[in-house]
Image (cartoon, grey):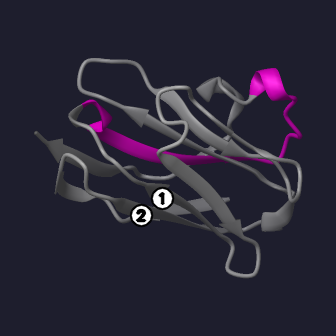
Amino acid sequence: VQLQASGGGLVQAGDSLRLSCVASGRTFSNLVMGWFRQAPGKERVFVAASRWSGRGTYYADSVKGRFTMARDNAKDTVYLQMNSLKPEDTAVYYCAATGTQLILSSLYAPGNYDYWGQGTQVTVSS
């Protein structure tokens, strides 16, 4: 599976951005898709995940109510709509995928994902 993320940029606090991640190489609807982020000097952490079609979307507490993850199976694409951005959202954002049907408690660990995109930088100024 190849993942290509895009949509990052430099914005001000309170602004919005939409990230996109296009997947290729495998039946998209069967993939568990995730978004993670990594700030400088910190570990990569979970942001959101979407289990295979119709099985729910899950968010980190830090982004709940501000970020929305959506998947378009017809376009093999997942999106991360980020609203009300804060300086602490500044990070490199990565999309990830796995063909393993992860249980809920396994969605949050980066090590459970087999495929990663190249990352896209999001910088939020105060």
The percent position of residue 119, horizontal first and vertical second, equals 39, 49
Label 1 sits on a secondary structure element that is strand
Q: Residues within 10 Å of mark 2 (few under 14, many from 20)?
A: some
The residue drawn where x is 64% and y is 25% is 111
Q: Is residue 2 above or below residue 99?
A: below
The numbered mark at residue 81 is 1
Mark 2 is on which residue type?
Arg
Left or right of 84? Residue 47 is right
Left or right of 28? Residue 60 is left
Q: Are marks 1 and 2 in contact (CB under 8 Å)?
A: yes
Q: Which residue is mark 2?
A: 18
Viewer-side residue, 101 vs 62: 62
The percent position of residue 28, horizontal first and vertical second, equals 78, 66
Left or right of 28? Residue 124 is left
The percent position of residue 26, horizontal first and vertical second, equals 78, 65
Say whether residue 95 is magenta.
Answer: yes
